[in-house]
Amino acid sequence: MEDGDNGNTNNPNGGANGPLMNTIIGGKVLRSYRKVLYENHKENPCFYDAFFLDSGYIIGGERRKKLIALPSFRSTVISFVDRKIAKKDLNTNFYVQHPELEVREIRLTQLRRIKYELLLYALEPNSPLELATVAHAYWYFERLVVQGMVNRSNRKIIVASCVLLAIKFLETGDVTRKLVYFKGRWKKYHSTYYNHVLRRRDDDDDDEEEEEDEEREGVQVDWRKVLLAEFPVYVGLDFTLLPDVGSNVIAVHVERLLQIINVTMQEYYGRRRSFEEQSLLGGYTYYNYLYY
């Protein structure tokens, strides 16, 4: 048997020491691309770091402070900042850290809104989805954002495809029922977004143009596009749907999702049913009170 047949070839494109590995199955030498996929996802910082895109310390409005310097003392006055201005500052500070996302119009406020939406899918009454499942979905989404697969126009399609992959790969029991549940809630949320926009405009007329854009996006999203994007998303994730052994990136994502409702992981997993009450999330009206 030649060297190439037993996987010990010195060819840099094959063998055990090269980027490609040979595998013998049924007496035939097959080329494995496992190592190539592993090397690719190692280069994505979001694969290991749940704070890479949103550190949690990016805030808006802090630049609009006034320093009063007098002979005997100094005082800092923080003036009232309109929500629209604070929102703009927040995204501007985000682009300072991630300038490559400005071209694709990916905003920090959009990423945080997606997190709220995923949290609702897991915590609303009678939801069969686990919080860890939607945490995996958001982890997938962040990796695709860094890889350049996500822009403003397709972000909702991509995140829905990420949830589908997470449900199929992670959920147990009646997975079909859970897929049907997610499809129904996702379509209902995006088809009823117009009502929430109307309620919010009473409080913030300055964001009317931007909210109209969001409204059109919510109405025009087609579920068939979500299904068509599922396999490209799987490829974009390098077929890797689980973190490395010993990584705590998913636990951090779960913790950050629960921080939205000021609940710790111990409280949530200790008495989960109590957090599914309508009084906590307020159903779909929960979105009326989002800062972003």
Image: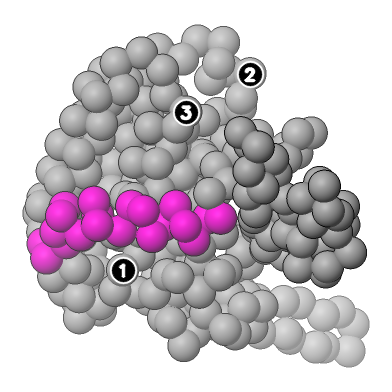
Task: Name the kind of residue labelled 2 in the image.
Answer: Gln
- Residue at 77% from the left image edge and 50% from the top image edge: 5
- Foreground mark, 2 or 3, reads 3
Q: Is residue 76 above or below residue 42?
A: below
Q: CA distance from mark 3 to mark 1?
A: 24 Å
Q: Is residue 148 left or right of residue 46?
A: left
Residue 142 on the magenta segment: no
Question: Which stretch is magenta?
Answer: 219-238
Q: CA distance from mark 2 to mark 1?
A: 35 Å
- Residue at 13% from the left image edge and 70% from the top image edge: 216
In this view, the residue in front, 266 or 61, is: 266
**Residue 182 position by quadrant:** top left
- Residue behind mark 3: 170
> Of helix, strand and loop, which one carries label 3?
helix
The answer to which of marks 3 and 1 sits earlier in the sequence is: 1
* Residue 131 drawn at (x, y percent): 47, 29
The numbered disc on residue 154 is 1
**Residue 11 position by quadrant:** bottom right
Q: Is residue 12 left or right of residue 183?
A: right
Total numbered badges shown on the rendered structure: 3
- Foreground mark, 3 or 1, reads 3
Task: Name the kind of residue labelled 1 in the image.
Answer: Asn
- Residue at 15% from the left image edge and 46% from the top image edge: 187
Task: Name the kind of residue labelled 3 in the image.
Answer: Leu
Q: Is residue 84 above or below residue 49?
A: below
User: Does residue 8 appear anywhere in the picture?
Assistant: yes
* Residue 135 drawn at (x, y percent): 51, 39
The answer to which of marks 2 and 1 sits earlier in the sequence is: 1
